[in-house]
Amino acid sequence: MQYALVEGVPQEATSGANGICGQCGAPAVAKCGPKVMHHWAHAGRKNCDPWWENETEWHRAWKNLFPSQCREVSHTAPTGEVHRADIKSPGGLYIEVQHSAMTDAERSSREEFYKNLVWIVDARKFASSFSLHHILPDPSLKWAQDLAWVRVSRPPSSHSANGMYFKFSLIAKDKAEWPEGNMHEVFSLHHIMGQVEASYIGHHQYHWRRPYTTWLSATCPVYLDFGTERMMRLETYPVGNIPCVRLISKSRLIADLLSKTSAGDVCL
Ligand SMILES: [Zn+2]
């Protein structure tokens, strides 16, 4: 933990300090060795919050982007269940910064508990099995809604990875003329690249070998942090319902996390 109560006031760990856990009241001891990130630990037993994961420098860096009163905030459900969120934003968003793998059961129970929740996932460990592919147009545009993109195959073939699509309007026309047929003209993104670039708002196809499927099933927004300025939100592209990511700058995400009150309004 970054904070424990010392004489009733949340304090960061300093060498030799003693405090108490703000959630359960158990004694907390400061861990401030030369090679460990300074933190508090429950004296002689496990953390009172079963959802708590050991903090890394990565966790601490995310928490430190928010005012100190936003970090490690306990939330009590109507049932009396208590957990400590990594971050509760000034607008009331709960933000969980998650480094370790997680089961579906734990992921969904946290979503149910916090409700207004945003996930920040440490994606650095699977960066080598994740590849970003071609851009997609703004799906709200009428012409874009006629394009049926070929899902990037696994392993990625250069054709699908560079962008290929059918047209829904031509498929319908073919079916009207040849009800038995299933051959349709296929097009290449290459030919309309200028138009797609002009309408690009961050959507891309991607390929994820051995994906952490719990993040694909999440009901709250998931932002992947590959350790760069470019965050990726996992989404479903609404035209054809294919998996996609949306690229969002980290600075924009942080600004929205600090100002928005609803998880669904972040980086709309
Ligand atoms: Zn505790």
Image (cartoon, grey):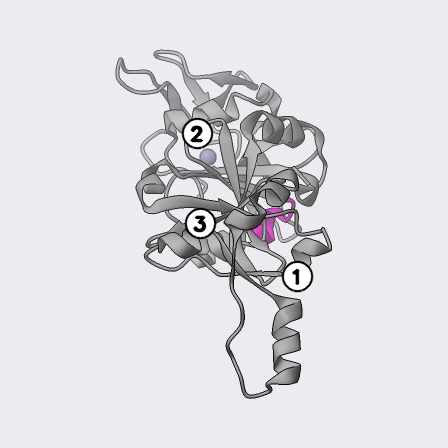
Q: Check residue 251 in the rendering and tell me which mark sits there, or answer none.
A: none
The x, y position of residue 120, in whole percent, is 50, 38
Of the two numbered discs 2 and 1 on the same chain, state the one appearing first in sequence: 2
Q: Tell me the residue that label 3 is attached to.
A: 162
Mark pair 2, 1: CA separation: 42 Å
Give SS at disc 2: helix
Q: Which residues are magenta?
A: 111-117
Q: Tell me the residue that label 2 is attached to.
A: 59
> Is residue 116 magenta-colored?
yes
From the image, state whether disc 2 or disc 1 is nearer to you: 1
Q: Quadrant of residue 198?
A: top right
- Residue 103 showing in the rendered view: no
The x, y position of residue 201, in whole percent, is 63, 40
Of the two numbered discs 3 and 2 on the same chain, state the one appearing first in sequence: 2
At a point 28% along the width and 15% down the height, the residue shown is 33
At a point 65% along the width and 47% down the height, the residue shown is 138
